[in-house]
Amino acid sequence: MCALLAFYVEAGVDAVLDEAPVDRLTAWAQEPTSSRVSAQGPPSSPGPPQARAVLGRANVANVNSGPRPSPFTSPARGENDADTPPAPDAAIMSARQAAASAASLDLLRAIIERFEGCALRFTAKQLVFADGNPRARVMFVGEAPGRDEDIAGRAFVGRSGQLLDRMMAAIGLDRTAAYIANVVPWRPPGNRTPTPQETQICLPFIKRQIELADPDILVCLGGPSAAALLGLTGGIRRLRGRWCAYHTGTREIRAIATFHPAYLLRTPLEKRFAWRDFQAIKTALAQ
Ligand code: URA
């Protein structure tokens, strides 16, 4: 038994979702088609995550019980009302509206705490909103929290966070002089990569967080963060170290992408390039 549990942990299966195993494939096949209705669903049905976003907290307790559509797929178009947007679009729109309504970082945090349009919030232990000083001149943004962050509720507190601390210290920064967040604020199960859909749903929140924190310099840690925020695609080794403009919504600031500390832990030879990027950040902060 211990060996099996150790194997699960090693494989990233470290979150308990239910008391008993559920064969969702069988349950799905047996469920009558008529009960797999639109994204809005009947009020008593747990439904897919975007429906829960509309239905609200009362359904959270039902999330892990009984057969339901996969939280990572949307219903086929034909199953929706003609005027109802497909599920992920509804969640993205609802995230945009919610984010835009936040007048401060505290309000934004409270809004995200209540947001139920992203399935990750149901498997994560808690929201990982940020860490550091929201009034800092530099903001670092990673991809998504890992296990340690999920437990602590703070961004970059695990091994990669400790490396980030050392990299910041090399240019005279610590967490009182930097603000740190993630594109996706909930830990994906087993530390898997967030799906494009999850990233799109969470994007309005991190964009608003950047706008409200209003740093002078934005640092994207890793390719996924650079792709989501700066639209840079094509491999972080090619993209890193180049300054570009980022529009916060109220002004244009300088942005740069560099390696994610987790990647540097696996590939220490690349640290020399990260060193250059951090020197460039130091120079930019001095200007
Ligand atoms: N990796 C990230 O991208 N973010 C964290 O907060 C921790 C690890």
Image (cartoon, helix red, strand yellow):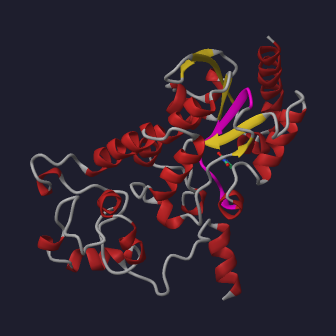
In the orientation shown, which residue stands out farthest toward the front? 103
Q: In the image, is residue 18 above or below residue 136?
A: below
Span shown in magenta: 136-147
Q: Position of residue 240 (x, y in %)?
A: 67, 23
Q: Is residue 243 above or below residue 154?
A: above
Residue 284 lies in what quarter of the image? top right
Q: Is residue 143 visible?
A: no
Name the quarter where the C terminus is drawn. top right
Is residue 48 or residue 207 the one in the foreground?
Answer: 207
Residue 1 in percent (x, y) is at 66, 89
Residue under the point 16% across and 65% down: 37
Q: Is residue 263 left or right of residue 74?
A: right
Residue closer to the observer: 58 or 171: 58
- Where is 26 relative to 243, above or below? below
Depth order, front residue of 47/266: 47
Relative to residue 254, is residue 132 drawn left or right?
A: right
Quarter of the image for residue 34 reads bottom left
The residue shown at (20%, 65%) is: 41
Residue 283 in view here: yes
Q: Is residue 83 left or right of residue 225?
A: left
Q: Residue at x 22, y 57 (%)?
A: 75
